[in-house]
Structures are given as structure tokens and as C-alpha cells.
Image (cartoon, rainbow, N blue to C red):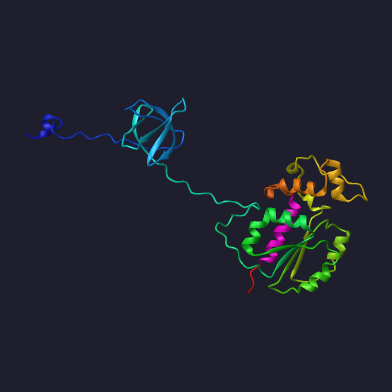
Amino acid sequence: MRSHDYGRDILSTPKRKKVPEVPAEPGLVVEDPASGFCGAVVKFEYGQVVLEDRHGRHRLFPLNPAGFLLDGQPVTLVKPAPQPQKPKISASGSVRVEGLRAQTAKASRIWVEGKHDAELVERVWGHDLRVEGIVVEPLDGVDELPARIAEFGTASHRRLGVLVDHLVANSKEQRIVDRIHDDNVLVTGHPYVDIWQAVKPQAVKIKAWPVVPRGVPWKEGVCAALGWGETWEGWQRVLGSVSSYRDIESDLLGAVERLIDFVTVPQD
């Protein structure tokens, strides 16, 4: 007689219910049924999982199949899949190049007006410039800029990018720049009297940059108005407040980015 006439085959092995696998994400609360210890996943050590109970006690448990209870149901804890690492971002907002080796400086240069300008550019764009092999040099003013450019001797592989403070219509700086006619030179600038002003006031924890009366040196006037002491002390305060491009006014950001693009154009 056929077995189905008698119902289910009593000699057959019943199928076991598959125990679900659950990624042991930090914070997941499970119970060890053998000890009754209930806690949240903290970390992994030596191939085992560490649980922390509500009293802050830690215990180590092996990742055995069906070794834990989750909401009263048996589960197998497994290590979560590793998350893809997000690229690290430099202070300028570009993707940081890891394991960068110093390379020989290229012939092209970026000139800025003074030491403070150079230090601020280094603070924000230093990583990018080292990747490209571009050196930033202070000019100590732009009065002799046309003569300095002629002395430098530009070429298609030897470009100059120049950052000028207070580059506004009808200014002395604008008149100097108007005398430069060289396809291998790009001059950009910002409207601020001094590079300090290109740092956002909120970054320096002030409401606004003080208005300095005519005839008073700008840095000295600012330090006096804000009680910052000597100008070198004021500059350390300003530079120390800058951690990334977010602390810089857009006028300076755009000016420097254009210079970097100009001096790093691949040559044939």
C-alpha cells in the first residue's frame, strides 16, 4: 500500500527551520540564552562579539550558529559587511591624495603679495599645491610687478599666477595690473584691503571686521579696535581660525582656484 494512504511518512526527518543571520551592528540588543546575559553589541574582539548590558558590564561571546536571541527568536550573529570608506577631503574641498610623495617643483609659480597671504593659501590649498608641485612665493607688494615678471621670464611651461590684494576699479593695484600683457601670466585678486578680511568674521568670532580710519595702517587699526595686541598676535588669531575653505570668503576662493587651474594646465 502506498505511503500516502497513511499520511506523512513517520520515518522521514523533519526539516529544520532556518535560523536567520543578522549583522551584528553596534547597538543591536541580543540575549545569550545560556547565561541570560542581555546587552547591546559594542565591538568585536578575537573573532567574538562584545555585549554591554544596561549596567555597563561587558562580556565576550562566540559567534555560534543560533547562539543568540533577538526579540525572543534564535538568530545567528554575523559580522557586518565592511562599509566603503569615504574619500578624505582636503582643506580646499578636493579629494585628498593619500601616500603623496614629494615631487620636484614645476617651473610655474603662484605669487602672492606677502607672508600672510602665502600662509593663508598654504593653510587652505597646501595639499593641492603639493600634489601639483606648485610653489607659492610672497612678493612683498605689487609695485614692481611688471619688472618682476620680465625678470622671471615666462613661457608656456613656465606660467605665473599672481594674487593681488584690493584689486578694485581705479585702485593703484588695478592700474599696475593693466600694464601686464602676457598670455602666460594670470592676475586675479580680491576686493579686501588686506588678506585678513578674506577670512569670514564668524570664523574669527567677531561680528564684522572693524572700519579703520584713513591714515591708520589697517592691521594696526584692526588689532587696536579688537584688543588683539600686536599685529603678529592678531595674525596668529586669524590664521588659527581657518580650518577649511568654508572659513574663507568666496572672492578669495574663486581667485585662488583660477590661479591653480592656470598654472597646472598640462603642456604639450
Query: In x, y percent, where is residue 149?
Result: 79, 70
Residue 39 lies in what quarter of the image? top left
Q: Is residue 248 above or below residue 34?
A: below
Q: In front here: 35 or 268?
A: 35
Q: Is residue 95 left or right of residue 210?
A: left
| Quarter containing the N terminus | top left
The majority secondary structure of the magenta stretch comes to helix
Q: Position of residue 211 (x, y in %)?
A: 87, 45
Q: Quadrant of the C terminus?
A: bottom right
Instruction: Indicate yes or no whether the magenta region holds residue 108.
Output: no
Apparent side of residue 75 relative to residue 216 in the rendered image (left or right): left
Residue found at the far right of this picture: 215
Q: Residue furthest left?
A: 1
At horizontal 82% and vertical 67% (from top left) the residue drawn is: 145
Q: Is residue 16 left or right of residue 221?
A: left
Magenta span covers which residues? 249-264
Q: Quadrant of residue 191?
A: bottom right
* Residue 66 percent coordinates (x, y): 31, 34
Front residue of 7/76: it is 76
Give me the residue at 73% from left, 51% from top: 250
